[in-house]
């Protein structure tokens, strides 16, 4: 209300995206959605609900890939609202690649390139249901026997592991290295030298 913007631009599919979008729509301020049109077609994912609703109330939809354009057209969005602009995540990756190369994360973690895998695990559909999470641990138990895994543990995942009683099982895996979450540049470097990313 104080700023009186000409438009509001939101990015992605997190809760703050739809929350900000709703405020703009209710104040009749045009909404612009970056990363519009992406779909998993799984309405049990909170992100999917956020995507669909944000797109429905947006005046301009900036899309990252041709499939996003097709999704929006199929949903009845007017073609003149849709703009294929490219992927800001890839732009960010390319812009930070050189800086990430300077990271000393491999030295700090005493890792040799191509002799480890990286694991990321945080989606609600994977970590909220103890039975699903236990099934994923079954697979990881096998994988870590072949390739040592480095696992920067997301706070959501850590909490669910502890609540479900699965934390001890994960900690007992000999070639599974649990570490705190990493910053963007360190994680890029860690991924770039990994034998596999899960």
Image: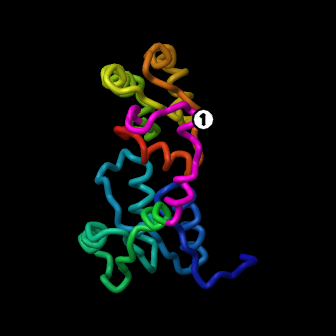
The colour scheme used here is: rainbow
Which residue position is annotated with label 1?
A: 108
Label 1 SS: helix
In the picture, the quarter occupied by the N terminus is bottom right
9 or 94, which is in the foreground? 94
Q: What residue lies at 50% left-to-right and 64% top-to-bottom? A: 92
Quarter assignment of residue 130: top left
Q: Vertical placement of 32 versus 17: above or below?
A: below
Whole-percent x, y for residue 193 in the image: 42, 43
Categorize mark 1 by other alpha carbons within 10 Å: few (<14), some (14-19), many (20+): few
Q: What residue lies at 50% left-to-right and 14% top-to-bottom? A: 168
Whole-percent x, y for residue 72 in the image: 30, 71
Instruction: Report the residue that reaches farthest toward the right.
Output: 2
Q: Is residue 77 magenta?
A: no
In the picture, the quarter occupied by the C terminus is top left
78 or 174, which is in the foreground? 174
Q: Vertical placement of 10 versus 16: above or below?
A: below
Q: What residue lies at 75% left-to-right and 77% top-to-bottom? A: 2
Magenta residue span: 95-117
Q: Vertical placement of 87 versus 39: above or below?
A: below
Whole-percent x, y for residue 19 in the image: 57, 61
Q: Vertical placement of 84 versus 120: above or below?
A: below
Quarter assignment of residue 82: bottom left
Q: What residue lies at 26% left-to-right and 67% top-to-bottom? A: 67
Left or right of residue 192: residue 181: right
Total of numbered circles in the picture? 1
18 or 115, which is in the foreground? 115
150 or 159, which is in the foreground? 150
Q: Is residue 108 magenta?
A: yes
Whole-percent x, y for residue 57 in the image: 45, 72
């Amino acid at each position: 209300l104080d700023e009186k913007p000409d438009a509001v631009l939101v990015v992605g599919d997190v809760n703050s995206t739809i929350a900000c979008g709703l405020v703009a729509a209710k104040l009749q301020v045009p909404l612009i959605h970056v990363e519009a049109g992406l779909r998993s077609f799984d309405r049990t994912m909170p992100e999917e609900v956020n995507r669909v609703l944000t797109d429905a109330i947006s005046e301009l939809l900036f899309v990252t890939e041709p499939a996003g354009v097709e999704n929006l057209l199929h949903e009845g969005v007017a073609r003149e609202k849709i703009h294929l602009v490219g992927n800001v995540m890839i732009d960010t990756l390319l812009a930070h690649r050189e800086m990430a190369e300077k990271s000393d994360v491999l030295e700090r973690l005493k890792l040799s390139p191509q002799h480890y895998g990286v694991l990321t695990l945080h989606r609600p559909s994977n970590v909220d249901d103890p039975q699903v999470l236990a099934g994923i641990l079954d697979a990881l138990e096998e994988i870590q026997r072949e390739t040592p895994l480095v696992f920067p543990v997301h706070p959501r995942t850590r909490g669910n592991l502890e609540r479900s009683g699965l934390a001890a099982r994960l900690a007992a895996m000999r070639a599974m290295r649990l570490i705190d979450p990493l910053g963007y540049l360190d994680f890029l470097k860690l991924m770039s030298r990994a034998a596999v990313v899960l």
